[in-house]
Image (spheres, rainbow, N blue to C red):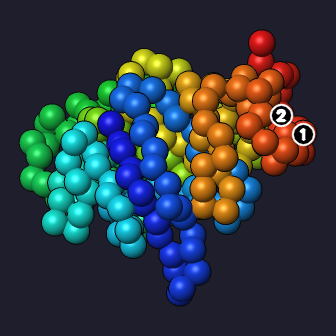
Amino acid sequence: MFALRDVSKGYAGRPALGPLSLDLPAGRTTVLIGPSGCGKSTLLRLLIGLVEPDTGTVTFDGTPVTPVTARAVRLRVGYVIQDGGLFPHLTARGNVTLMARHLGRDRAATAARVAELADLARFPPDGLDRYPHQLSGGQRQRVGLMRALVLDPAALLLDEPLGALDPLVRADLQAELRDIFRRLGKTVVLVTHDLGEATFFADRVVLLRDGRVVQEGSPADLWHRPADPFVTRFVQAQRGPEVPA
């Protein structure tokens, strides 16, 4: 679904990512993981065209992601950030329907889609007319997910979506998100720094360090078949769930 070829990106003359080449398969959940500053969020922004690579090419479903095509790509890719990234002056419903209204979508069809997504995300219908400051952190994250899904995108990108939540709410949302990913069968790329969370979600894990891919494969590969000493140290430093079989 996504492909990067010899991609690099820097800021203020300092390298942030790459050069790297990477394929992100359709219909699977790929988790990007690594220490702070390793390039995870930069990679995600490159996929959706929020930033341009300094070198190399990024493609989405065979289409190069460029300033010319970025808007069309974004209409086919949902994007979720930490705490939902909601507009405070809009209600939950207003946030969810923002792009549908901007594109002039049918109001009745949009209302039906909102009801469908509220059920999918287990969001209380009476919360749709509340403003973000009237919602809990978990509810704001659910609204962010609904907004990302409202146009029924082909792919879903999530940048540490659960990082700001307390452990109990986070555990509940992890289980619900994994169920949603499986039910929808979409291409999912999720960023986290937590190996336990990566193991919980991932069909495939990509471990980054200093802007480069250190190892990619199943979560069990990282646990049991580390590619180099850094992978071993990274795994040992984590305090996640039980080691997968």
64 or 105: nearer the viewer: 64
Mark 1: secondary structure? helix
- Can residue 97 be seen by looking at this rendering? no
Mark 1 surroundings within 10 Å by alpha-carbon count, few (fewer than 14), some (14 through 19), many (20 or more): few
Which residue: 83% across, 34% down? 240
Is 52 drawn above or below residue 118 in the view shown?
Answer: below
How far across and down, in percent of the image, does residue 223 sit?
Answer: 79, 28
Tell me, yes or no, whether the two marked residues, 2 and 1, touch with CB atoms within 8 Å: no
Left or right for 75, reference 116: left
Q: Quadrant of the C terminus?
A: top right
Pick the residue in front: 147 or 239: 239
Q: Say what secondary structure mark 2 lies in.
A: loop
User: Mark 2 — residue?
Assistant: 240
Q: Is residue 237 above or below residue 244?
A: below
Q: Which one is in front, 53 or 71?
A: 53
Q: Looking at this view, is 168 or 129 the one in front?
A: 168
Question: Which corner quadrant of the image does residue 173 belong to?
Answer: top right
- The image quadrant of residue 184 is top left
* The image quarter in which residue 26 lies: top left
| Distance between mark 2 and mark 1 Cα atoms | 10 Å
Q: Residue at x 35, y 42 (%)?
A: 2
Q: Which mark is residue 236?
A: 1
Say which of marks 2 and 1 sits in front: 1
Image-based side of 81 in relation to 245, left or right: left
In x, y percent, where is residue 85? 49, 60
Q: Amino acid at mark 1?
A: Gln
The quadrant of the image that shows the N terminus is top left
Question: How far from the left and from the top, in percent, is residue 34?
Answer: 70, 51
* Amino acid at pointer 2: Gly
150 on left or right of 27: left
Confirm whether residue 204 shows in the render: yes
Q: Is residue 180 left or right of residue 237?
A: left
